[in-house]
Every structure is written in C-alpha cells, then in structure tokens.
Amino acid sequence: MLLLRIAGLVMLWAWAAAPVALAAEIDHQRAVAAGDERHNWLLHGRDYGEQRHSPLRQINKETVQDLGLAWYFEDHTDRALEATPIVVDGVMYVSGTWSVVYALNAVTGELLWKYDPRVPRTMAGKACCDVVNRGVAVWRGKVYVGTLDGRLVAIDASSGQRVWEVLTVDQSKPYTITGAPRIVKDKVVIGNGGAEYGVRGYITAYDSETGEQAWRFYTVPGNPEEGFENAAMAMAAETWNGQWWKLGGGGTVWDHMAYDPELDLLYIGVGNGSPWNRRLRSPGGGDNLFLSSIVAVRPDSGEYVWHYQVVPSESWDYTATQHMVLADIEWQGEIRKVLMQAPKSGFFMIIDRVTGELLSAEPFAEVTWATHYDLSTGRPVETPGADYADGKATVKPGGGGAHNWQPMAYNPERGLMYIPKMEAPFVYVEPEKFVAKPGWRNQGTDRSEAPPGNELLHRAISRRIAQGFLLAWDVKRQKAAWEVQLPTPWNGGVLSTAGDLVFQGNGDRRFVAYAAGTGELLWEAHTQSPILAAPISFEVDGEQYITIAVGGGGAFGLMSGVKPPPGAARSRFLTYKLGASLALPAVPEPAEIPAPPPLSDGDELRAERGGVLYAENCAYCHGVGAISGGTLPDLRRLQPSSHELFNEIVHNGLFSTLGMPAFGEVLSEEDVKDIHSYVLVKAHEDKALRETPAWLLSIKKVWYEVLAWLISVFLSASAASA
Ligand code: CA
C-alpha cells in the first residue's frame, strides 16, 4: 500500500514537473489545417496563407482595457528583435539576435532551453540591416533556424540539442540569412540576403529529417558560359545584358513565402538587383527576371510554374520580398484565388495565384516612380526621369519602401488588410564613376550629398519627410478604409484578431490595440524599447495571450538617427493577458556623456571629406549625420579611449569580435582620419547643443522647423516633377 502511494506520488511529481509538452509534432496534415487550431500559432504567418488573423476573441473591444503584462523574457542583447514566435500546445519557440533560439513556457516565460549557433560576430559587417532573425519553423519534433552566417540548423524540440546542420551559402560571398524557414511536405525551404553587397539569389529545400538537399531554385541567371540550371534560367537570361553575374545580379529571397496546399504552389518573394542601378547592372536594358518578382514553384521539385514581375528592371531597391497574403475573395462578381502584396514600390497588388495574372494595382502610399499599372500588359508605367539617368531623382517611395518586411495582417471577415506603411523619399544619385568593391556595399548610387548640417535641422526634416502609418486597406475597393498616423516612420508588424482588434507595436515604444473597423485607439502599453516585430496570439487552458518582441534597430532604425532612447533597455519578448499587471524593471539611467577631445587644426577641413566617407561607409549602422538611432554606439559620444583607438577600431578591426567590422579593405588610414575629424566636429556640435540654454533652444527649434518646412516643400515639388 505504502509502495503504491509512493509510486503515485512519484507519478504526480513527474506530471507536475513536466507541465508543458515539447513534442512539437507538426506534419503536413496539421500544417495545412493550422488555421483551424484556435489556440496555436504553428506557422510563421499562422497559416500557410499567412493571414496573421487569430480566431481568438476573449480579448476584445469590451475586455481589452484589462490587458496587462503576464511575463517577459530578456534576449541577450539590446538590439533589434524581428521574430514571429511559433506556439505549439503551450510551448513558444522564438529567435533572438545573432540567430539564437529559445524554447519558452508560453504561460510563464520560463526558459526551457536555449540554442546558440555561435554566429561569428564579424558577420555584422555583411548584414545590411542588423543582426536580426525573423523566426524559426517547427516540424515533427524539430525546430529549424537559418543563421546569419548562412547555415540551416535543425534542433531537437525537446532537448534543444542540434540534430543536423547544413551550410546553405558560399561563405566566401557576402550572404546572410535573416528570414524564417518555411516547411512544406517535409522539406525545409530557406532563402538568403546580401543583394546590397553583390550576390546571386536563390532558395534551397532540404529534407527535414536528414538535412539532405532536395533542390535549389536560383532567382537570377548565372554566367551563360557555365550553362543554365533549368529552362527558367535560360528564359530569365534573355532579359539581361552585359556581365551581370560578376556582381551576382541580386534577387535574394530574404523574407516572405506563402504556400497554397490545394494548388500545391509555393510562392516566393524576390528582392532587388545587385547593384540597384539598372544601367550598371544590365547595360543595354532588359527586365532582369526574376528581380522584384513573385515566383510560383512546385515545393516537391523547385520547378518553376509562373512569375509576376512587380517592378521590371527595378532600380530603386524595390524588393517584392514583402509579405504575401493568400485569400479567396470576391472580385468583380467572381470568387478568385488571389495573392495580395503591398511591396516596397507602393502599389497594392492583387494577383490571381493560379495563373499569376495581375488583377489590380493601386497606390497605397504616395508614389512618384510610376503613374499607374497598365492592366492589359500587367506592367507599370514609369515616370520619366525617375530612374535618375539624368543624374539625380528624389523618388517616393525610397529604398526603405512604402512597406518593408514588417508583416501586415488580413481580417477576412472585414476584407481589410492592415499595413505598416511608411512614407519616405530617397534621393538617388547616378554615380560619376562606379567601382565595384567585392564583399562591400555595391548599390551603384552615390551618397555624395552632405547630410543636413546639424541635429535640430536633421530631426525637423526627418519628421516631415519620413512618416509612419497604420493603414487599413479595403481590398475589394482597393482604397484606404482608415489610417492612423504614428509618431515615427519605422514601426512594427501587425496582428488581426477575431476580437475585432488590430495590434501593432511602434517605433515610439508603445504597443497598441485599435478597433478593427475604425482605427480607434482602445489600449496601449509602454514597452521601453521600440518595436519592429509582429505580435501573435495563442491560448492555453482557456486564457488568451498576446506576445510581442520588442527591440529597435533594423535597416531604417539604425540609419535614420531619428530618436535615440534615453537609456538602453534589454530587448525582450513581452506576453500580455487579461487581468495581469506585471511591471517592467526600470530603465537604467543613461550613462554620463563624455566630453569630446578638443578639435585640432585641420579637423574642420578633413571633416568635409570625412562626411562623405562617413555617409558611404558608416551611416547605415551608426546613423546619418553621426546621430545614432539608439541601437549602436553614438560616435559623437565615444569614450576618450575609443577616440584614441579610432584607427585601430575602424581600420584594423579591434572590435571585430564585438560586431564592428575592420574597414581596412576599403578605407585607407587617411580616410579613417578624415572620418574621425567628421565625428569630432559632430561631437562638438552635439556638446554645444546640450549646453544651449532652454530659451535659445526653443527659438532655434522654431527656426529649424520653418527651414525644414521649406526644404520639405522643395523636396516634394522636385519629387512630383521627377
Ligand atoms: Ca535591398
């Protein structure tokens, strides 16, 4: 009897100690029906159609006021988090910076295991847009992650141990992986990035059990002398000229895919050209397939089925890698199987996903590069001069896009697509002389424009010309239903719920719920860090949860230098539920700002040249005008020792194991001196600004607001005439 009791107690203890099941048994049947599992979030976009609409409704207009923080989990850095978590029966699988993977108890946030693929920190120099990862995939007891240095790793879902790993790129080339893998019928499909640096894009499928390569589909043709991999590449090569393969051609599939199980088509979004400038990439013209295209392939074989090119011969970094949503909608009296995308180029595309036929393209943001799409040909009609062949053009949208990677969400009941929209022009400048720098940025556009002279002006201009919105787009009418302007241009992805709510996190560090039909703000929470990722929703034991990853940076966040936070908060995964009221720990006090070393003779002169070099080499990460976006060090506020070691750090790579690349290949020691002079001049401007009396600062601000207004009027006039 006693023995039985002890055995019973042991069993009870074992049951209590294992409150979560780490089985993660997702197979084809379950994945196809993922949308029906109310309580889970099994696939990247929740279902294969990537609608990101949760059927849960416990959190709704009436109850959302009671939403509070249930738990938070800290990532190992304070850099950008972009991942969409996967939730399988109470367990959350999610990735952080440097491709680190976590398994968490979805109810408590308790860490079940952590897998660190040990990405070499020198990779930061090859990553155009921060050391981010957009999520994992889960399949038959394994978790899959693409690492920044180009590996695909399968991890045991219960132990967190690596099962297999394959190298999916040529590591001698500037490839990176930031996108989430997709799994279709036991094949893990992974793309890559690097088109700003010069690579040839492709996706590869691997057997989910063994890691054996099943197929590879290139998105642009290689050197014809080496023969084409398939008929699709031979066809694509007809649309290229010159020696495009030398810089790779581009067309990386760095983010979104979608799958239609009924048609058995995998849709991939293809990126921009290497370089951006089409005259340098393919002299003599051509559409340059499959740049900026949506391509449908067979998931079993990688065989090409159809393509639709969103922007033929793209020249503006107009990727079509943006989120694609599949839905069956009523279109002009018929039910059509459509694929919808709001790509960087600013037109909302509705495409027949059976055939690839363009049904409609209407601007969802201000667009100046094209006037419209001709539906009889399916092609855009370009605005003369927008391709900067004449030397220079201010174009909307800019390379950041009217919509970037941040996922949108589709509410099928309302027929509304919720889009994190950005309005930001870019000044494209034809280079006087283009010299390719293998392994480094090769965009084929000059950045010789001096950035605005001071921080106040820069901020005032930025606020006017770069703006962010949450846009609710009425798909059937192809026009806006409502729109909310946000305080910053670079904001988070979106979640739609059957509770008739829309959730979005913002660059100004607020997580917000809106009424799905009107955009009325119903609830908000302060998150300490800016938000880029998209929220998800799931349910455990009858309670609905909302999770969002917070942590700012990414392409625009690093470069724009718009709004540094007051103190560095750890990047976190935050989970909310009704009735919870946990508070985040206080943000640490910002460190005291060290005084810059005095300027010496010649610094002012050197700074002029240094400013141009800074814009070309440093601004992408440390911010335009040496104003950091808050994620990476603000060079104006370096410690005295870093000023002393400036050449060691920048030229020789003293901090390369921390993620600061060595620039010795592309910058001479003289160049580095010039950049340092520029940084010093900016540091003294920053010091003077901090010491300006409040009354004088107010007057200056008003003056710069007026100046910024005049500049923005001039810019929009020149954009309109481009
Ligand atoms: Ca790009």
Image (cartoon, rainbow, N blue to C red):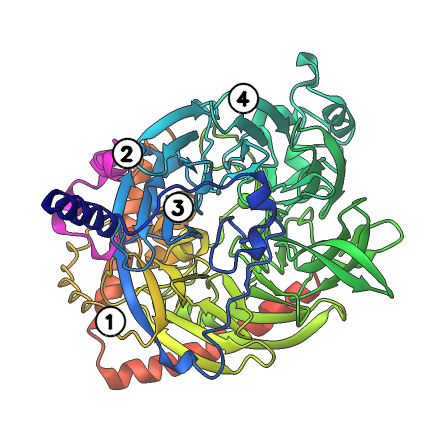
Q: Residues within 10 Å of mark 4 (few under 14, many from 20)?
A: some
Kindly identify which residue carries mark 3: 132
Q: Residues within 10 Å of mark 1 (few under 14, many from 20)?
A: few
Q: CA distance from mark 3 to mark 1?
A: 27 Å
Query: Which of pointers 2 and 3 lies earlier in the amino acid sequence?
Result: 3
Q: Identify which residue, 484 or 89, lies in the foreground.
A: 89
Q: Is residue 148 magenta?
A: no
Residue 587: give x, y in percent of width and height.
Answer: 20, 67
Q: Are marks 2 and 3 in contact (CB under 8 Å)?
A: no
Q: Residues within 10 Å of mark 3 (few under 14, many from 20)?
A: many
Q: CA distance from mark 3 to mark 4?
A: 25 Å
Residue 464: give x, y in percent of width and height.
Answer: 50, 72
Query: Which of pointers 4 and 2 lies earlier in the amino acid sequence?
Result: 4
Kind of residue at disc 4: Gln
Among all residues in the image, which is located at the extreme right?
Answer: 376
Residue 644: give x, y in percent of width and height.
Answer: 15, 43
The answer to whether residue 222 is seen in the rendering is yes
Image: magenta residue range: 634-658
Q: CA distance from mark 4 to mark 1?
A: 46 Å
Kindly identify which residue carries mark 2: 651
Q: Is residue 655 magenta?
A: yes
Q: Residue at the spot x=66%, y=72% of the render?
A: 414
